[in-house]
Image (cartoon, rainbow, N blue to C red):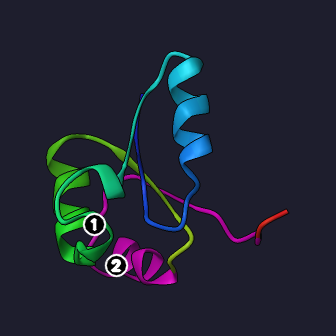
Amino acid sequence: MKFLCDVHIPFKLVRWLISEGFEAIHVNSILDSWHTEDSKIRKFSDENDFILITKDKDFKSSFFIIQSPKKLIRVTMGNI
């Protein structure tokens, strides 16, 4: 599995996913870093077959309305 972590997802999760054998990258490491527009993140995720992990409810809306990103995990808990 391949994971793309959105801006508000900690790098620690990316490192953990990689240590568990998954491919994982953080939005801040690609594209326009933390300035990347949601539409570019969705496009990158879909074109490269990533599962997008985010806290952003806008991605939930786009997932249901325009079916993009194709694969989504939305984290709804705050920092613990």
Which residue carries the number 1 mark?
68
Q: How crowded is the residue under tag 2: few (<14 C-alpha within 10 Å), some, or many (20+)?
A: some
Q: If the image is split into quadrants, where does the C terminus sit?
A: bottom right
Mark 2 belongs to which amino acid? Answer: Ser
> Residue at coordinates 61% horizontally, 30% vertically from top-left?
16
The magenta stretch spans residue 24: no
Q: Which residue is mark 2?
A: 62
Quarter containing the N terminus: top left
Q: Secondary structure at mark 1?
A: loop
Please state the extent of the stretch shown in magenta in the rendering: 57-78
- Which residue in the rendered view is the most extreme toward the top? 21
Q: Is residue 56 above or below residue 44?
A: below
Q: Are marks 1 and 2 in contact (CB under 8 Å)?
A: yes
Residue 40: percent from left, percent from top: 17, 68
Q: Secondary structure at mark 2?
A: helix
Q: Looking at the picture, tell me which residue is in the foreground, 22 or 68.
A: 22
Q: Position of residue 39 (x, y in %)?
A: 20, 75
Determine the CA span between mark 1 and mark 2: 6 Å
